[in-house]
Amino acid sequence: MTTDYARARRHLSRRDPVMREARDWFAAFYADSFQDIVNVSGSEDDRFFRMALTYWDMAALFVNQGAIDEQMFNETNVEHLFVFAKIEPILADLRQTWNAPEMLKNFEALVRRTPNNEKTLADIRERIKMIQTMMAERAKTQAAGA
């Protein structure tokens, strides 16, 4: 195992319980607008929001710098595409509001190299909408049965 790879692996450990909690939180989080992000700011969820995004930006940095093989990373992982698909529509607003033009640049660069990334991200957003609809219907059914 190369030194760079071993170091990257330690940094990206998915076993960290707080990081796992943040990634789980982000999986269930849906921002329909920039206002949804504003509503999270300052709350307990804000740290999960920031933690999940910085995790993927750091992972992308390791891939972009060659510490993790890009093909291997992409063949064993799609979570980063789901995260980016969720954040992409509001990324420009985040960068402008937080005066951070370089925010998530590593993450974005990695995703943009994904073949057919625009279609892939659009397809993911459609799947996310379907999941949201199914979850809302399930909650409605459960509420009616309670």
Image (cartoon, helix red, strand yellow):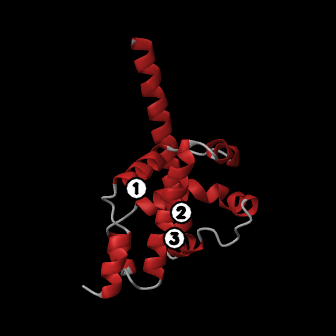
Q: Nearer the viewer, mark 1 or mark 2?
A: 1
Disc nearer the start of the sequence (3/2) = 3
- Residue at screen point 33% across, 65% down: 13
Disc 1, SS:
helix
Name the spot of residue 128 as percent of width and height, x first. 49, 46
Q: Which mark is residue 19?
A: 1
Observer able to see residue 114: no
Name the spot of residue 134 as percent of width and height, x first. 44, 33
> The residue under label 3 is which amino acid type?
Val
Residue 50 lies in what quarter of the image? Answer: bottom right
Identify the residue position indicated by label 2 in the image. Answer: 119
Q: Is residue 7 left or right of residue 135?
A: left
- Above or below residue 42? Residue 118 is below
Q: Nearer the viewer, residue 40 or 116?
A: 40
- Residue at screen point 50% across, 34% down: 133
Q: Nearer the viewer, mark 3 or mark 2?
A: 3
Identify the residue position indicated by label 3 in the image. Answer: 111
Name the spot of residue 89 as percent of width and height, x first. 64, 56
> The residue under label 2 is which amino acid type?
Lys
Quadrant holding the C terminus: top left
Disc nearer the start of the sequence (1/2) = 1
